Amino acid sequence: MSFASIMSNPALRPWGVEAKATIVLAWPLVLTNLAQILVNSTDVLMMGWLGPGELAAGALAFNLYFAFMIFGIGLVNASAPLMASELGKRNHAVREVRRTVRQMLWICIAIALPVWMALWQTEAILRALGQDPKVAANAAAYMHTLQWSYLPSLAYLTLRSFLSALQRPRWALAVGTAAVAVNAFANWCLMFGNLGAPNLGLVGAGVGSFITSLFTFGALSLVVLTDRQFRRYYLFGNFWRADWERFRAIWKIGVPIALTSTFEVTVFNAAALLMGVIGTAALAAHTIALQLCAVSFMVPLGFSQAAAVRVGRAYGANDETAMMRAGWTPFIMGVGFMGMMAIIMMSVPHLLIGVFLDSADPANANVIPLAVSFLFIAALFQVFDGAQVIGAGMLRGLQDTRVPMVYAALGYWIGGLGVGALLAFPLHMNGFGIWIGLASGLAIVSALLTLRWARRDGLGLTLPPWARNPA
């Protein structure tokens, strides 16, 4: 059925309108997410040019940094549905939106201080985890410049959430795309001493990341202060005025989101460690399959972000019918996309793996068959992964985050890693068993989240007091 026929049918027209609104909101979010992957990939690529020792140290430091960053991102993700619900209740909720942004920035500052203190101890942390002392020292030197990116990065993401809640994400895409070039140029100068810059090596990569984070926050701040669509919100006005009820509301919604993200990310980290126990070939094949999944994941992630905003607006308006359409529309689109990716992965696995490995090189003879087998499971994994991330976004629009956190903890760690470890070791299925476990964990979480959404009438649609009666 064509889009024109949908729009000409009175019964289907609301779905067509919702589909158009979802796509308009989601595609810049998808591309912005992909731009962030390019920034991270540029760092890894240039660290590799320095040598394997620097790459190992950089990877260790970045993984530690990302463990703290994913928690902060989870907190920031609470702000978009909160602002969306305010705008759904009243389209010109300027003061309410401004106060949510202000309190979110307060939280960014509050968590940055202890995170900075913890990351300053990177060398001690890595040595306690049994890492080589020289590698730990190099990782700490890199971290002592990288860690200052934490606060401006979270502040930038807060402004991104503001633009998403207003359904105007294209400026964030423009800034995110420019950040790829800024990061690459800063790294090229500072890591290798080009254009008269100091040759800082791995430390230069951390300085480059800090410069890039300042650029993204500064550029988006300039946009919200000068663009006529955004400047009326006067986001940085009365910055030190407290709104403790809103401050607590963000923590209440955001901490479960942060823990949910942490459970998901750490289960993949644990899976990589188990692959390392199985063998080098298994770990290499796992890394390739996971990288392919990560790229395709950016699409349902964008639909999840769009769902949180669209559902949040319907939630704020107390419009059950609009909420239902706002949830199922991105779910169908995102899961449908992942279904197509599953077909591609099953149809041309060697072509996809060939992007990373030369099939003519005898050194890859053991890796490629493993990667092909993992990619077969990854095809099923795609559909479940899309369903769980969009389902979580739909429920976030309802500000329903605590039960999904429990689902994530049980699903990923018991139904996922627990099953994977059982299959891999006692049942001797090795890496294939780990991937079956990951897919089963995602399947469990996606089923639970989707069922909870389908039974959403029991969740209640009452707005919190601070949203009903803003101070």
Image: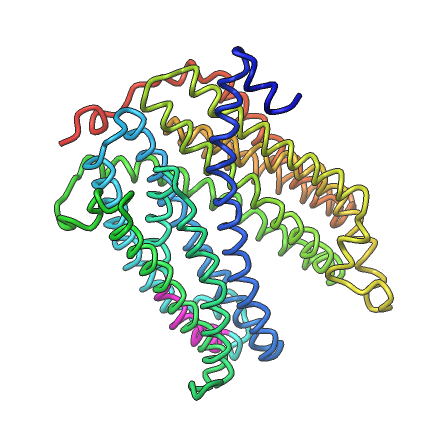
Q: Which residue is drawn at 52% across and 45% down?
A: 30
Q: Position of residue 463 (x, y in %)?
A: 28, 23
Q: Which residue is drawn at 26% across and 55% down?
A: 109
Magenta span: helix, strand or loop, mainly?
A: helix
Q: Is residue 92 left or right of residue 392?
A: left
Please give the range of residues in magenta. Answer: 136-149
**Quadrant in the picture for residue 421:** top right
Along the viewing direction, whichever of 68 and 121 lies nearer the viewer: 68
Q: Where is residue 130 in the image (x, y as percent from the top left)?
A: 54, 68
Q: Residue at x 54, y 56 (%)?
A: 37
Give above or below for 194 relative to 298: below
Q: In this view, does 129 lie to the left or right of 400?
A: right
Q: Residue furthest top?
A: 11
Is-magenta flag for residue 140? Answer: yes
Along the viewing direction, whichever of 360 and 421 lies nearer the viewer: 360
Is-magenta flag for residue 279? Answer: no
Give the quadrant of the C terminus: top left
Give above or below for 161 relative to 121: above
Along the viewing direction, whichever of 183 and 349 lies nearer the viewer: 183
Give above or below for 77 relative to 148: above
Give the quadrant of the N terminus: top right
Colour scheme of the rendered structure: rainbow
Q: Residue at x 82, y 53 (%)?
A: 350
Q: Where is residue 126 in the image (x, y as percent from the top left)?
A: 48, 68
Q: Position of residue 337 (x, y in %)?
A: 64, 36
